Image: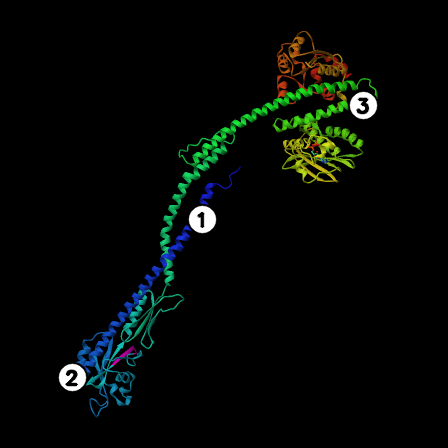
Amino acid sequence: MQIKSSLKRKSIFALAIYLALVLATVGSVSYFVVEPPVREQLERNLDLRTQVISSQIEMPLTGALNLLDSIVAIGATGEPQAIQSTMLFSLFSSVKGVTVSGGLWPAPYSVDAQVPYKSLFLNCASDGVLERVYSWDNPESGGYDQEDWYARAAKLPAGGVFWSQVYIDPFTHVQMITASAPYFVEQQFAGVATVDVSLTSFIEFVKTQAEKSGIGVVLRDSYGEVITEYDFQIMKEIYISQNQFGDFNWSIDVVNAKQLIKEQVFGLVSKVEASIIPIMLACVMMGYFLINRFLIGPIVLIAKKVGDSKESGPIDINYQSQDEIQHLIHTFNQKTIYLEQERKLAQASTRAKTAFLATLSHEIRTPMNGVLGTAQILLKTGLNDEQRKHLKTLYDSGEHMMTLLNEILDFSKIEQGHLELEKEAFALESIIGSINSIYFTLCSEKGLQFNIINDVPDNRWYLSDKARLRQVLFNLLNNAVKFTSTGYVEVEFKEQQKSSRNYLCIVVTDTGIGIEPEAQDKIFKPFEQAESSTTRRFGGTGLGLAIVKQICELMNGQVVLASEVGIGSRFEIFLEMETCTPGVAENKEATKADYSGLKALIVEDNRINAIIIETFMSNRGFDCTQVDNGLLALEKLQNHQFDLILMDNHMPVMDGVEATTEIRAMKQKQSDILILGCTADVFKETRDKMMAAGVNYIVPKPIDERELDDALHRFAPLLYQFKHDLTVIKSN
Ligand code: ADP
């Protein structure tokens, strides 16, 4: 299995999520925890600033009120105006501040019974010089007692003060405000005292303060009229710090001009977070390092070691800590050792099974060879029809039994990985030819049509395993014929190129009983048939298609099945086939030769087999000698000249492999003699051993006469190596 998402990547991902969550939590928690006190603090700061500004404004105004009190006191002395004037001049000259003018405004005719208005009003000019102003005394101007500040103050009791609205002084064009208060002489209302306060310095002060602290301010008088305003904007959720101050009831509203408190708090929390983040990051990195070092690292290492040791034994990791990981490694190793032992046991049992199968096959095939061989020989003798019919049945049943035996052995060979593909050059036509002759007859007997469609280029030769290709085709065609009672059986050959590889595609179609969709996968498994009644109706082992599938896979191909019950089946197989240059076509007719004059030594311990082989060989003109084992064969070769040895393998005293080795080691010319190995052993190892010992070719038992003829024809040069003259005669 490929590791697609590594633990390391997952842990980094998890840590990133963790970090994001922690930051979000810390952010919101600290916002909600820090926000209220910070907000409170900021509001308090703003209130404090409001207080400071208020008191800064209040102070000079209180000074002005004190001055007013002093003027009232001068008025209350009841002294003649000249004295009061001197007192006022001395009072004003010592006063520095916001008061720019002020004085006494006696009640009409109270000073002089002839003159209604005799004010004592002093004004401090811009150059600092004090002067008395008489303009208010002119009765034509309407009289100062008609003025609001006079009339309102006159109604007040002793000690009361009336503050006028803000106004622009007509002479100085400066914003002013006037405080007026009544004065009494001997408890009799005697007039009104005033002070005029210039607001210029307040306006300037408020502006400077607002600018300096980044605040918005609005200052209002007791009438709610705006005295001055600077950068005062009201926004949603803004905090307004308000204060009412002084006896004169002025009010001041202050806001934070640049930022809402909320924004300020947010900024503050962000700053806190910005300083926390690096610490958190460092903690997370540290955490990751520790997790990686103590958890992920060992697990990744175990995964790698386990991956590396897939085919070897326990894993060896230098891991000291006595924890779960150590336990895991220990348990894994114990399990591996246990499994290794079990594997060895299983291998031993498989080897035993293989050996048993080899022996079994030999033991069964040897007597079968006798049965089939004898049947073949008998069939060539003079028999009446009845005898021939029975003998044919005997032969066919024997062959069927050999087929079943071969299928079982083939399957176990493939299953154990013993099947190795041969590579020999052959013409596709040779296979098509044999199929045609066999299945045309078979189909005709059943009343079926048999078609062959060949779309493969003419004279196509392949370098592949011809026997296995035949096996696949025969299995598919046997089934097609077996399961079809009307219609046709068709086989189509074509080639396909896929990713620069050449595939031979064979399609076997029939109009038979078809296969249920549920059974379509099942039938490719060993010993499985589409329905249980199949064995009863048609026989078979249920191995044919399993073998077909495995051979196709071995040949880098596949089988595709399409079937419909009652309509028929279509098996399409793809086999990777290497093409090769056409060679000399096999000609069966040419192999039927007369070998008179040649001598054959048959080395075979089984008497029946020996007779069969001898009969086959004698029929072909050979002069035959038979011995029971390899040692006797060696002795025979010392004194006699032979052209061919037919060598069995399993024999008492000396087996075929040893005897062949000895023959090839001999000094005489005889050491080059043609040796054909005849063995019932189906396993490649035995064949390989015989070939390695020096056998020229293997003719498997039970011996098929055609195969024997093929071999003799193929090795003719070796066969005639000691008797060239005979070849000349034959070719004539
Ligand atoms: P066997 O023929 O020896 O039983 P196979 O593996 O060759 O074993 O086939 C397995 C089963 O698949 C058969 O028993 C049969 O039920 C089904 N089968 C195979 N080929 C065909 C076919 N051409 N038409 C219908 N059924 C088939």
Residue mark closest to the camera, 3 vs 2: 3
**Res 186 seen here:** yes
First in sequence: mark 1 or mark 2?
Answer: 1
Given residues 682 and 598, the one toward you in this image is 682
The amino acid marked with disc number 2 is Ile
- Write down the region rendered in magenta: 173-180
Q: Is residue 175 magenta?
A: yes
Q: Label 3's element?
A: helix
- Magenta segment main secondary structure: strand
Q: Are marks 1 and 2 in contact (CB under 8 Å)?
A: no
The three-letter code of the residue at mark 3 reads Lys
Measured Cα–Cα span from mark 1 to mark 2: 90 Å
The tally of labels here is: 3
Residue that mark 1 sits on:
17
Q: Earlier in the sequence, mark 3 or mark 2?
A: 2
Disc 3 packing (10 Å; few <14; some 14–19; many ≥20): few
Counting from the top left corner in percent of width and height, residue 204 is at 29, 71
Residue labelled with disc 3: 389
Side of 717 where 262 appears, left or right: left
Q: Position of residue 614 (x, y in %)?
A: 73, 14
Left or right of residue 240, residue 590 in this image: right
> Separation of disc 3 and disc 2 at Cα?
175 Å
N-terminal of the pair, mark 3 or mark 1, is 1
Whereabouts is ligand 1, in terms of quadrant? Answer: top right
- For disc 2, the marked residue is 83
Q: Is residue 707 depicted above or below 325 in this figure?
A: above
Q: Of helix, strand and loop, which one carries label 1?
A: helix
Report whether the residue tagged 3 is closer than 8 Å to ligand 1.
Answer: no
Dividing the picture into quarters, in which one does residue 469 lie? Answer: top right
